[in-house]
Image (cartoon, rainbow, N blue to C red):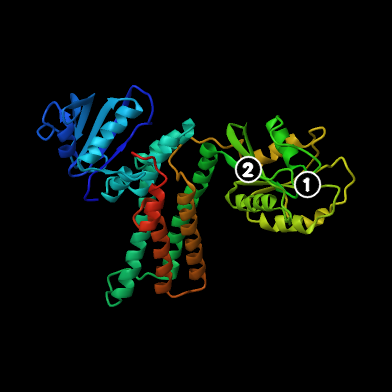
Amino acid sequence: MNDTIAAISTTLGVGAISIIRVSGAEAIFIVNQIFKGKDLEKVDTHTIHYGHIFDQEEEIDEVLVSVMKAPKTFTTEDVVEINCHGGISTTNKVLELVLNHGARLAEPGEFTKRAFLNGRIDLAQAESVMDLINAKNESKRKVAIKGLNGYVSNIIRNLRQEILELLASIEVNIDYPEYEDIEVMTNEKIKPKMKEIKEKLKKIIIESENGKVLTNGIKTIIIGRPNVGKSSILNRLLDEEKAIVTDIEGTTRDTVEGSITIHGVALNLMDTAGIRDTNDIVEKIGVEKSLNLIKEADLVILVLNNNEELTIEDKKILDYCQDKKTIVVINKNDLERKINMEEIPYKNIIYTNTIDLNGIDSLKEKIVELFNLNELEQKDYTYLSNVRQISLAKESYSILEEVEKGIEEEVPIDMIEIDIKRSWEKLGEIIGETYTEKLIDQLFSQFCLGK
């Protein structure tokens, strides 16, 4: 954090301009050594200056240089941005000169990381920076802007403040029981406040999950044993021959992907390798990948064969998917039924065959029903934007459920306080009030170089 960093902040290639960003205590001094024009160390902050970049006596490029002095900058440090002509050779040469004169090449996301560590933005806002860069639809852009402007962070901070006030009241009772003029906090008095906080958090989680569907789509995996019709169902949903379909088991050895839109929401489909015990090394890798993808999916379409009894593999898959939103498709319903429906512990069941497309529309309707797509209309884009944030909110909610249970069981109030504090800390991880160095490094490593 004490050194000066530099990186190219625009896409490297042929273009009108490229921007080299420099941040740190020596930023102005370093750029001033290679710039001929005004003395950058004497100019006002937030000004732009015309001049040339020189490597000793050799002119490299005609540039505009923006000078922004601490603390009112993105990183809160001195920041200089060199706007040079676009092009790989010119851009790299200017960056090389900056590095040769004392700057260090920035790591991915290091500018935003410094903005976070220097207190200019919180962790949720930092993540929104990358969301804004990667936004591929209008909903995603609106969510990112709300997050970047701190609306989401404020919701979490307000909730944490309510919990903190409750914690303070409990601690006063524990630490100073002799004072008679303070309200005595008991489990019964805590209970209504906890319920109110829990309901607010639940609302945030529901709205965030709905919003995630609108902005990111529904990650859908089609899974089942080999030769039950998974690839055919994918092709019919996409209305194209995307996946190879044969009668040979193990034809699909890796994921085949495609996307359709249902009620304005993207259904991101993945056909997977058939799950079975196999000695084929390549197919085995595909099977393991299929099982791992189940964990990441928003929706599982589990395909079973109508004219076969459930196999051991079928039953394993049914057990594996029990914690996910799952639609069971009983395929090949044009053939004699041999499957025992009483062995299937799921209520969302569709019957189909891939010869005459029978049941495909029913499958789409079931997806609409399962995700409330008919009613899903987002007007307020202030909600948690990614899996990390939603997972932490859910963990916090689960802890509050434990608190309620403890109150019912008359657990001592000092023990109740410990769980309430755990919930408060989980919410803090969303905005970076509590964090680990490993988490921060991992998060910012996913950012663009130069951002």
Q: Is residue 159 visible?
A: no
Residue 412, position as x, y percentages in the image: 43, 75
Q: Which mark is residue 220?
A: 2
Q: Is residue 100 above or below residue 343?
A: above
- Are circles 1 and 2 on residues that touch, CB within 8 Å? no
**In the image, farthest residue toward the left:** 42
Residue that appears at 17% across and 43% down: 26
Residue located at (40% from left, 49% from top): 443
Q: Residue at x 31, y 30 (%)?
A: 91
Residue 127 location, quadrant: top left
Asked which quadrant contains residue 448, the reply is: top left
Mark 1 crowdedness (10 Å alpha carbons): few <14, some 14-19, many ≥20: some
In-front residue for pair 102/141: 102
The image shows residue 132 at horizontal and vertical percentages of: 41, 36
Left or right: 313 as drawn, with respect to 431? right
Disc 2 residue type?
Thr
Crowdedness near tag 2: few (<14), some (14–19) or many (≥20) residues, C-alpha within 10 Å: many
Image mark for residue 400: none
Q: How many labels does the image show?
A: 2
Q: Nearer the viewer, mark 1 or mark 2?
A: 1
- Look at label 1 and name its amino acid: Glu
Residue found at the far front of this picture: 57
Measured from the top left, where is residue 280 in percent x and y?
Answer: 71, 53
| Nearest to the observer: residue 320 or residue 180 | 320
Residue at the spot 26% in from the left edge and 49% down from the top edge: 118
Q: Which of 39 and 203 is in front in this view?
A: 39
Q: Does any portion of residue 167 appear in the rendered image?
A: yes
* Residue identified by numbered label 1: 249
Secondary structure at badge 1 equals loop
